[in-house]
Structure formats: structure tokens, C-alpha cells
């Protein structure tokens, strides 16, 4: 039974007893289908090379001069709660875009925004546009971004029907020759895996809550723009000191699917331990903001820990990269090829 946002509370969602069942149920979710294409009903299995093979996920990286400088570009969309809290929804979207770009070593500098399926002549449409504009301006100021002259462009519809109002942002940045290009993929067996950011019990607006439990309306995920500023400063410093070998924001599908996206390209696995402080579904599938997943060479672990302590940023050891097996709390979920072949 689908609950409304007003009815939903975390305690009303039963904590799963079988994590493996949840994982394979979520794998048929179209929003997570880039993991394995289970919904691609064909007889030919999908090779790991065809999945997650983009070092920068949905971002593009282009050389634009003869000096080795590169331009980064990405596009992101969001519709959750745009009607209820357009300012916060817009700030979340821009934070996600900036965090992802910083994770592969580029510095975001310019942003433009587009509101789709909205009628600004309608009071509700005007409220959405006004809130989104405030969110855009606030996030741009916090993250040092230049905004296109028109602020937000509109796609005018008198009736948007079943399509919810959506905001789309395009972000551009630079990766100079001397910067380190970091990809989201795990590099080698034995590397240590850390999560940077707070440990938060939150499954709001997650793919897990909506797809697995059928709760289509819930509050926005946990978000603090001041924490985002600290996290983004942190990833810049770790990159400059060459202390991380992989980095990715915890995104769709939560921590588990972020791990999976990092493991697939090089056919590696991971062995992790969850926290006893929060529910296991929140730990693995929650999509709270302000978190990064990084891979660290064991030889640089002490330097990494010292840098994190100096910056006073919360972090915790999650586990390590394996040759291909996936383990959660000492339970084996099989090998990475199990996650990339049809069933």
C-alpha cells in the first residue's frame, strides 16, 4: 500500500531480514538498470565492459587546448519535492552535480538551469520558479559558481499532465594538466574503502523506499549545504595530496549500489562491515547527502587518516576491495559476475 508523505515514518518500514533479496529486487529497477540491464530482455549477456565503463559516469571530459587542459561537463535532473520545497530540491541537485564533478578531479565553475513542464503564469508554477531561483542563487554562491545570464530557463506548459515539474542543471568545470584525474572505479585488490561524511539513518526519497516498499511520497533526503561545502573542500585537498585512488558520491541506490558501480569496471568486489548504530537498510540503501566513497592505497592510509583528522571531517572505514567476491557482514553474496549477468 502506497503511503503519503504525511503518513510515512521510518519506523513504519520493516527492516529487511534478507539483504540479498532486497539487492536483487532493486536490480530490476529501471533507475538502477545501468548496473546490470536485467530489464533488457535479450538472450545475449551484458559484459562488464558495457556496464559502468565511463570513468566519469554521466559526465563528459574533453580536451580543449594544446596545453593538456580539459573541460568537464555534466547534466543532472531532479523532480522530488520540486512543488513542495523547490529551493531545497534545487540546492540538493546542484550539490550532487558539484560533488560528482569534484570526485574525478575537476573544479566546477559554471552552471545553467532549466525548469521543465511548468507554467510560470500559474501561482503554483510561479512558486516553484521563485523557490528554484533562490536555491540556484544560494548554491551558486556557496560553491563559487557562475550562473548563466537568464538564471533559469523555462519550458512553458499550461498543463503538464502526469509529468511532474522537473529541474535540469548543466554544469561545466575545468581539469588542468597538473590535476589528478580520479575515476569512480576501484583500482586493485586490497585497497581500503572509506566513507567520508556523517553516518545518518535516513531512507527518504530513496530508490529502496520507493521501489521496494512502494512509498512514493516521503521527505527529501537528509541535507545540509554547510556540510556539502566541507565535503567538497575535503575532496579537493585529498585530490591535491594524491591520497585517494577512486572517489564517487554516494548516489542512487545508496552505498551498496555506489560500491557496485565502483567494482564493476575492473571486475573487482568488496568486503564491507555495516554499522550497528543504524538500520542496515538505511546504511546500505539510504541516499542521504554529503557522503563520498573513496578507495585508498594501504601504503597511504596513515597519510589519509591524518589529513582527515586535520580537516575534522567525519569518516569511517567500510572495508576493502576484493578480487571479485562481494561480502557484507561476513555474508557472501557471490562474485561480481553474478551482479552483471542476467538471471
Image: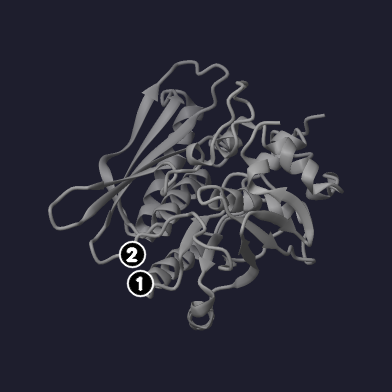
- Quadrant holding the C terminus: top right
Q: Is residue 57 above or below residue 43?
A: below
How far apart in space, not on screen, are marks 2 and 1 (Cα)? 7 Å
- Quadrant holding the N terminus: top right
Q: How is the image coloured?
A: one colour
Please give the name of the residue rendered at 44% of the width and 23% of the height, measured from the top-left corner.
119
Q: Provide the secondary structure element on which disc 1 rests.
A: helix
How many residues crowd around disc 2 within 10 Å: few (fewer than 14), some, or many (20 or more)? some
Q: Provide the secondary structure element on which disc 2 rests.
A: loop
Q: Which residue is mark 1?
A: 240
Q: Is residue 265 above or below residue 310?
A: above
Marks 1 and 2: in contact by CB < 8 Å? Answer: yes
Q: Nearer the viewer, mark 2 or mark 1?
A: 2
Q: Kindly identify which numbered label has been placed on residue 232.
A: none
Q: Is residue 5 in view from this perspective? A: no
Instruction: Judge from the rendering whether residue 263 lies leftward or rightward of residue 25; answer left or right.
Output: left
Instruction: Judge from the rendering whether residue 332 lies leftward or rightward of residue 298; answer left or right.
Output: right
- Residue most toward the left? 66
Quadrant position of residue 328: bottom right
Give the image location of residue 329, x and y in percent: 78, 61
Please give the name of the residue rendered at 68% of the width and 46% of the height, measured from the top-left corner.
204
Give the image location of residue 157, x and y in percent: 43, 18
Instruction: Judge from the rendering whether residue 319 lies leftward or rightward of residue 12; answer left or right.
Output: left
Please give the name of the residue rendered at 77% of the width and 42% of the height, measured from the top-left corner.
22
- Mark closer to the chain start, 2 or 1: 2
Disc tally is: 2
Give the image location of residue 219, x and y in percent: 66, 44
Camera-side residue of 1 and 182: 182
Please give the name of the residue rendered at 45% of the width and 16% of the height, measured from the top-left corner.
158
Camera-side residue of 16 and 203: 16
Q: Which residue is mark 2?
A: 180
Give the image location of residue 144, x and y in percent: 32, 59
Amino acid at each position: 500500500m502506497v503511503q503519503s508523505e504525511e503518513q510515512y515514518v521510518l519506523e513504519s518500514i520493516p527492516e529487511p531480514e534478507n539483504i540479498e533479496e532486497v539487492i536483487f529486487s532493486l536490480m530490476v529497477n529501471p533507475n538502477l538498470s545501468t548496473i546490470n540491464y536485467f530489464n533488457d530482455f535479450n538472450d545475449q549477456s551484458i559484459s562488464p565492459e558495457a556496464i559502468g565503463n565511463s570513468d566519469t559516469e554521466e559526465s563528459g571530459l574533453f580536451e580543449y587546448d594544446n596545453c593538456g587542459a580539459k573541460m568537464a561537463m555534466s547534466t543532472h535532473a531532479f523532480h522530488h519535492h520540486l512543488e513542495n520545497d523547490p529551493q531545497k530540491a534545487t540546492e540538493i541537485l546542484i550539490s550532487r552535480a558539484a560533488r560528482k564533478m569534484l570526485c574525478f578531479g575537476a573544479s566546477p565553475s559554471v552552471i545553467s538551469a532549466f525548469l521543465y513542464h511548468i507554467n510560470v503564469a500559474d501561482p503554483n508554477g510561479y512558486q516553484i520558479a521563485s523557490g528554484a531561483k533562490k536555491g540556484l542563487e544560494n548554491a551558486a554562491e556557496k560553491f563559487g559558481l557562475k550562473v548563466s545570464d537568464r538564471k533559469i530557463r523555462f519550458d512553458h506548459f499550461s498543463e503538464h499532465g502526469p509529468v511532474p515539474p522537473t529541474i535540469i542543471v548543466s554544469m561545466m568545470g575545468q581539469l588542468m594538466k597538473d590535476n589528478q584525474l580520479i575515476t569512480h572505479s576501484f583500482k586493485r585488490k586490497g585497497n581500503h574503502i572509506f566513507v567520508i561524511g556523517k553516518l545518518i539513518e535516513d531512507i527518504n526519497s530513496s530508490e529502496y523506499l520507493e521501489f521496494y516498499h512502494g512509498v512514493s511520497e516521503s521527505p527529501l533526503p537528509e541535507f545540509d549545504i554547510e556540510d556539502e561545502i566541507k565535503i567538497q573542500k575535503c575532496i579537493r585537498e585529498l585530490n591535491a595530496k594524491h591520497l585517494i585512488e577512486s572517489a564517487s558520491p554516494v548516489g542512487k541506490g545508496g552505498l551498496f549500489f555506489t560500491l557496485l558501480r565502483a567494482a564493476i569496471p575492473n571486475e573487482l568486489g568488496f568486503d564491507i562491515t555495516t554499522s550497528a548504530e543504524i538500520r542496515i537498510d538505511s546504511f546500505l540503501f539510504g541516499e542521504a547527502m554529503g557522503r563520498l566513497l573513496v578507495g585508498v592505497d594501504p601504503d597511504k592510509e596513515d597519510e589519509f587518516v591524518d589529513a582527515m583528522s586535520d580537516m575534522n571531517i567525519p569518516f569511517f572505514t567500510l572495508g576493502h576491495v576484493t578480487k571479485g567476491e562481494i561480502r557484507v557482514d561476513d555474508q557472501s553474496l557471490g562474485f561480481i559476475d553474478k551482479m552483471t549477468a542476467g538471471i
